[in-house]
Image (cartoon, grey):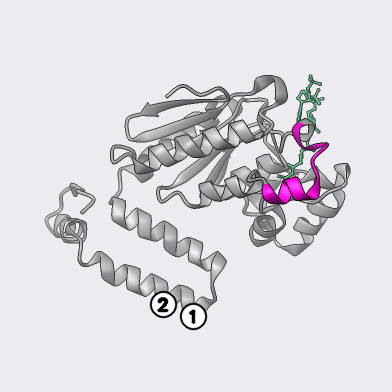
């Protein structure tokens, strides 16, 4: 499938999606988000793919929602349009999605990165929610995901006063998994994705769902969900294989069954 605003490729069991609107710093318009979700959904449904990486360019992961496309929108157009809802497509992915972030991850770009399951950042990555400077607030999860990731004090400063986080600060506050030199961030994200893609697929899927429950439910409900997922995995071939391989001191061969 050929897209207008993204590039896609596969690297063994990893699907790679590259945002590709260089002249607009990968600003997210309806076309880009629709194409991104389309490619993500296709990789998610492909049994040969075990994990997905979303990246931008060295200069900009994404500089936010496309302000030029949004500037004249009415409240009713925003409400009845699907732009912000499109972000939900990332959350719906069953397979792990890793953001490889370099340069600007601002506004919707920061929200896009935070919608992924893990973030690998280059030393030049800058995370921010500058919506306050254009008279609005984040609309694609920024106030919620940022607060859960970095805590109230820093989230307030970012949302109310346009504080940006350097890659090092983002790592210190728990927003990103690791920070690496710019020439290595994509390879590092691809390696992490390949590692995860090599693991027992059903356990990866239920592990992801269980961690996400921690953000969406009470502790009691989350613990209950985790326990049931754990029991369920004992009905899979991969549990038998994984534990037998440990006992027999060999590498397991996963079937995803
Ligand atoms: N929307 C549309 N176009 C954008 C854009 C955006 N979010 N960000 C950058 N661009 C465009 C610029 O307009 C410029 O285009 P032209 O050459 O046609 O003028 C091009 O990308 C290069 O940008 P700059 O010349 O500004 O580059 P810079 O290096 O001087 O600055 C920047 C880079 C700091 C990222 C700056 O472009 C900037 O502040 N961008 C806007 C960031 C922002 O406010 N994002 C939040 C958007 S709202 C949102 O995301 C809502 C939500 O929650 C969903």
What predominant SS class does the magenta segment belong to?
Answer: helix
**Which labelled disc corresponds to residue 220?**
1
Residue 224: quadrant of the picture: bottom left
Q: Quadrant of ligand 1?
A: top right
Q: Secondary structure at mark 1?
A: helix
Q: Position of residue 206 (x, y in %)?
A: 37, 60
Q: Is residue 61 magenta?
A: no
Q: Nearer the viewer, residue 119 or 167?
A: 119
Q: Is residue 18 above or below residue 83?
A: above
Q: Quadrant of the N terminus?
A: top left
Q: Which mark is residue 224?
A: 2
Q: Give the magenta part as a residue range.
A: 69-80
Residues at marks 2 and 1 touching, judged by CB atoms closer than 8 Å = yes
Which of 41 and 23 lies nearest the eye of the viewer? 41
The answer to whether residue 70 is magenta is: yes
Cβ at disc 2 under 8 Å from ligand 1: no
Quarter of the picture containing the C terminus is bottom left
Residue found 33% across the figure and 73% down from its top: 228
Identify which residue is drawn at 83% across, 37% down. 72
Q: As drawn, is 241 to the left or to the right of 209?
A: left
Left or right relative to 149: residue 55: left
* Camera-nearest residue between 206 and 81: 81
């Amino acid at each position: 499938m050929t897209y207008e605003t993204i590039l896609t490729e596969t690297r063994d069991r990893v699907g790679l999606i590259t945002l590709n609107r260089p002249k607009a710093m990968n600003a997210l318009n309806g076309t880009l988000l629709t194409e991104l979700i389309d490619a993500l959904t296709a990789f998610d449904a492909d049994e040969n793919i075990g994990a997905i990486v979303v990246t931008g360019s060295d200069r900009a992961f994404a500089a936010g929602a496309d302000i030029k496309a949004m500037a004249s929108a009415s409240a009713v157009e925003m409400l009845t349009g699907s732009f912000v809802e499109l972000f939900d497509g990332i959350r719906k992915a069953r397979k792990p999605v890793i953001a490889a972030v370099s340069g600007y991850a601002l506004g919707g770009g920061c929200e896009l990165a935070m919608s992924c399951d893990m973030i690998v950042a280059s030393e030049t990555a800058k995370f921010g929610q500058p919506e306050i400077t254009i008279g609005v607030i984040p609309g694609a999860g920024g106030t919620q995901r940022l607060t859960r990731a970095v805590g109230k004090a820093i989230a307030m400063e970012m949302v109310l006063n346009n504080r940006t986080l350097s890659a090092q600060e983002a790592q210190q506050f728990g927003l990103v998994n690791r920070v690496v030199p710019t020439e290595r961030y994509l390879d590092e994200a691809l390696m992490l994705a390949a590692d995860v893609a090599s693991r027992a697929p059903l356990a990866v899927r239920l592990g992801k769902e269980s961690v996400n429950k921690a953000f969406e439910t009470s502790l009691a409900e989350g613990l209950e969900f985790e326990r049931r997922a754990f029991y369920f995995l004992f009905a899979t071939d991969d549990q038998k294989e994984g534990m037998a391989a440990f006992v027999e001191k060999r590498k397991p061969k996963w079937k995803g069954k």
